[in-house]
Structures are given as structure tokens and as C-alpha cells.
Amino acid sequence: MRIGFIGAGKVGFTLGKYFREHGIEVTGYYSRSIQSASEAAEFTATNVYTRRDDLLAASDVLFFTLPDKEIESVYRQVSQLSIRGKIFCHCSGALSAQDAFPNIDDFSATGFSVHPLFAVSDKYNAYRELADVFFTLEGSTEKLAFMQTWLQGIDLQVRIVPTAVKVKYHCAAALASNYVLGLLQLSQNLLTECGFSPDEAEKALKPLFCGNAEHFRECGLTASLTGPLERGDLSTLQHHLTCLTPAQRQLYVLLAKELLQTAKEKHPQRNYTSIARFLEAQLVNASLSCAKG
Ligand SMILES: NC(=O)c1ccc[n+]([C@@H]2O[C@H](COP(=O)([O-])OP(=O)(O)OC[C@H]3O[C@@H](n4cnc5c(N)ncnc54)[C@H](OP(=O)(O)O)[C@@H]3O)[C@@H](O)[C@H]2O)c1
């Protein structure tokens, strides 16, 4: 299969290089700027296309490695051409294949979302890091198994995600990456309220956070849990809540409820009933005050 790319950005560079390194024929790149397309073509030893028609004609599969908001409109332009038998892929986690390539079946073509569960920030080096990365695949049922086999054949870990849960899947991914940064931001703010400068706070958080992340990588979620909740220390939890704003308290309690599940898995013999009751009561109080407000 010959693969072409519309959009020579971080993901286009990365997948193109990875495919080439795994013996796949990559035709080349079309992009908004000729400069990006030329750089990607040079990096992957493929071709630059100045016309989308020529890239389409030369390729069996087109990857739309574009910003999410551009994918559908570029697809609508490309689908004016003859796309019979072509396979279109995009890499957005948030969009389904049908969102991005509406009615693609009407053109006797197939569409997929192929999402790397990974933050690609270095377009020249990320291709080296794809071995551990999960790719989620969703789209046209008739060729789903074929696409899965093809991607697995080039050593990628592939999980099919039903279209109905694509949004939930993306929400899960965002929580584990972007939203963890939200927690770090809150923690940094609290440290600055304790007298740290923002830089100092960030520096202090790095070994704490990275040590935990490394532990998670090596031992998994349950083994990585430490702290007052794991120890069943209700009094410390109660003290923590006294120094937070009402909104922060809600976040703390919701996260503690999730952690309680992990703690019970880690220590099935421990009794966490008083903590569970306390957290439930906090949630009830919070929803009552929301209803009043
Ligand atoms: N980066 C990540 O961590 C990551 C992870 C997983 C999935 N994704 C998904 O991968 C896709 C691409 O993201 P990215 O990070 O690679 O974005 P990116 O680095 O911003 O690259 C997008 C490229 O698309 C080109 N482009 C924009 N509008 C265009 C148009 N109308 N026609 C042709 N080319 C156009 C831009 O071209 P010029 O450079 O020529 O101006 C740019 O190089 C998105 O769907 C994103 O959600 C990204």
C-alpha cells in the first residue's frame, strides 16, 4: 500500500518516518506551505506534492494529518476528485471517522481514525518512541480488521475503539495527560501560597511527580498509590479539606473517591468504610449547597 500525507506537521513527519523505517512505501506530502511539505519529504526521503490531486492519484491511503478543525473541509475538497477504493485516515482523538469523513461510503471509499495515544512534540525524533504507544483504530467496518492487521504488521499496538465510545476514549486520554497538568497547576498554586516562588514550586514538584510517574510505569497504578488515603488516615483528609476553597474541595473529594477504589484493590483486607462515608457526605453537602446557590 502506498501512503500519502496531507499535512506536514508533527504527526505527519512522525508517521511518515515510522512507515518508511518499516518498509512501507510512502509517496510523499502535500501541505499548506511548500516549505513544510519539502522538509517532511526530505526527512522521509519521499516526494513533495504541490497538487493534492497528484498525491491522491499516487496513493492508496491518505493520512489527513491536519489540525482537527481542518480535516472535514479538506476531505470535502478532496472528495470532489475520484476517491473510489481509497482509504482515508485521520489522527484526531476527538473526531470519529464519520465526523471527519461524512458519507465516505457513498464514494466507495473507506475512512478511519488512527489515533496515537501519545503526545508528539518533537517531529524529528518521536518516530523512535512509537514501540510502546497504543494506537486506537475506529471507522469503516468492512476494512477495520484489514487495517488492524496492517498496522500490527508494522509493529504497532492497535486497539479497536467502537465509534459510540470515541468521545469517552478521548476524554480518558485527556485526563491522563492534559488534566494531570491541571492538578500540577493547582499544586503549584498551593505551594506558592505556602511561600514558594512559582519556579521553586515547579522545581520541587518535578521529582515528586516524575518519581511517581516512573513508579506507575514500572509497577502499575495500584502499586504506585501511597499517601493518607491509602493508609486510611481520615483525619489528614479532613485537615486537607480545611485549607481548600469550596470548588477545590469538590475536586479533592472526587479524586479521593477514585483513589479509594485503587486503595481497596491494593489492600482488600483494610476497612475504608469511614473514609467512604465521609467522602459521600462531602459530596451530598456539596450538591445541596449547589442546589441552594
Ligand atoms: N501532536 C500530538 O501530540 C498529537 C497526538 C495525537 C494525535 N494528534 C492529531 O494529529 C493531527 C495532526 O496534529 P499535529 O500535532 O501533527 O499538528 P501540527 O503539527 O500543527 O501539523 C498540522 C499540519 O497541517 C498543515 N495544514 C494546516 N491546514 C492545512 C490545510 N488546509 N491543508 C493542508 N495542510 C494544512 C500545517 O501545514 P503547514 O506547516 O504547511 O502550514 C501543519 O504542518 C491532529 O488531528 C491531532 O489531533 C496529535
Image (spheres, grey):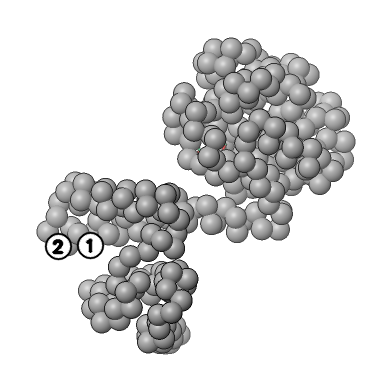
Distance between the alpha carbons at the discs numbered 1 and 2: 6 Å
Q: Nearer the viewer, residue 199 or 275?
A: 275
The spot of residue 212 in percent (x, y) is 34, 54
Q: Quadrant of the C terminus?
A: bottom left
Q: Is residue 288 left or right of residue 56?
A: left
Res 227 visible: yes
Q: Is residue 87 left or right of residue 119?
A: right
Q: Which residue is outermost to the front?
A: 269
- Tell me the residue at 40%/80% (across/down): 270
> In this view of the protein, which residue sits in the foreground, 252 or 229?
229
Is 288 drawn above or below residue 91 in the view shown? below
* Labelled pair 1, 2 in contact (Cβ < 8 Å): yes
The spot of residue 200 in percent (x, y) is 16, 48
Judging depth in this view, the residue of 276 and 89 nearest the camera is 276
Taking the spot 59% from the left edge, 33% from the top edge, the residue there is: 66
In this picture, is 100 found above or below 264? Answer: above
Give the residue type that dot 1 points to: Leu
Label 1 sits on a secondary structure element that is: helix
- Disc 1 residue lies near ligand 1 with CB under 8 A: no
Q: How many marks?
A: 2
Give coordinates of residue 49: x percent, y percent.
65, 15
In which quadrant of this rendering is ligand 1 seen?
top right
Q: Return the mark for residue 190.
A: 1
Decide if residue 241 is in sight here.
no
Q: Percent from the top left, x then y, of residue 54? A: 74, 16
The residue that disc 2 covers is 194
Please indicate whether residue 127 sits to the left or right of residue 139 in the image: left
Disc 2 residue type? Cys
